[in-house]
Image: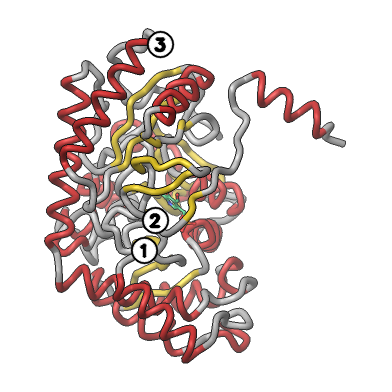
Amino acid sequence: MTDIAERLEELRDKGLYRRLRLISGPQGPRVTLDGQPVLLLCSNDYLGLANHPRVRGAAADAAMRWGAGAGASRLISGNMQPHGRLEDRLARFKGYESALLFGSGYLANTGTIAALAGRGEVVFSDQLNHASIIDGCRLSRAETFVYRHGDIEHLSWGLREAGERGALIVSDGVFSMDGDVAPLEQLVELARNNGCRLMVDEAHATGALGPDGRGSVAAAGLSGEVDVVMGTLGKALGSYGAYVCGRRELTDYLTNTARSLIFSTAPPPPAAAAGLAALELLESRPHRIEELHANAVTLRSALAAQGLAPGGSQTQSIPIEVGDASQTMELSERLLERGVFAQGIRPPTVPEGTSRLRFTVMSTHRSEELERAAELVGAAARELGIGPGPAAAKPVAVAA
Ligand SMILES: Cc1ncc(COP(=O)(O)O)c(C=O)c1O
């Protein structure tokens, strides 16, 4: 039996202990954290939609009309009008025949991957994929070939080795902790040439990349070419829940086989309605995406001016690698004392020895506050003797 106290002590010793912090009030560029006003630089509410009057209003109206909860899984009696409406809209938005809503991105990834690969088959997963993808691979009981981050040669080799056992290639579109974009064109080509399906996780790409924020797949002109496109409502769309887009046959198959859909309560109607309102805003007011891009450029260059290299980030997710977990948390604490909140990111979220601060900008940040924050980061980093260093991926051994 796990000795809980001992295990907690061990986490503290390694600088890996986590605790919940409390935000008072809604999400926004400036929030009150544990009673202290701070500039929020680690939220995924990239476009400020979680607190947008139209999105809030849609959730409130839906709560009054359809109630707070769905009451059952979608296959029992929990499938309601807001779910269907949102699915239709998502499918159109992403350029796919069909979309299927799940309770969360974690559930969408675990359920979908486990449904698309099984014992005796091989899933190919980028080394820096999100934990929900890793857990989906584990649940599938297929063999997992972890290819070096973005390394097409390594993936090709793995596909050749696997031969007919290859079932699924899966990659983040935008890597959550590094902010770089997957080599999607090459992934499509490899999947096609090797008779494998390709699944792309658009959690951090939806609302941030591509025309009207349609995501990295649309940005690369590959809508319809990627077999499975997954995304969440909980980040740029400001709500909660997730979806998988593909051909109708795919969503029909997942409806019948994805255990995380079958055995979990349907998303609450207010969450679905809020997601729909956010999508409408994205399409009618794309200026938010431009502001997000401009803010990402501002923060990246302001950090670079402080001698801090944001690795290969091309997006709103901007890492500054520190390496050591305790030192990362020390840097985070020092910034907090100065009114800047950027949570330290440590293993198992990122590989051992690559702990970092991962800054995320929002379209609603002001450029002056981002510039000022970068100065504070630079000063705190210098105090701690943290110098420039890329947050790029480090090669790891291939796990079976
Ligand atoms: C790349 C990626 N995929 C999936 C998820 C899970 O999505 P959700 O938060 O909706 O469960 C996340 C969340 O952090 C993510 O970063």
Residue that numbered label 1 is attached to: 50
Amino acid carrying mark 3 in the image: Leu
Amino acid carrying mark 2 in the image: Gln
Quick check: 142 left or right of 64?
right
Between 394 and 163, the one nearer to me in the picture: 394
Tell which circle, 1 or 2, labels the residue nearer the N-terminal end. 2
Does residue 390 sit above or below 346 in this rendering?
above
Q: Which image quadrant: the C terminus?
A: top right
Residue that numbered label 2 is attached to: 27
Does residue 280 sit above or below 322 in this rendering?
below
Tell which circle, 3 or 1, labels the residue nearer the N-terminal end. 1
Cα–Cα span, label 2 and label 3? 30 Å
**Whether label 2 touches label 3, CB < 8 Å:** no
Residue that numbered label 3 is attached to: 384
Q: Which image quadrant: the N terminus?
A: top right
Does residue 288 sit above or below 4 in this rendering?
below
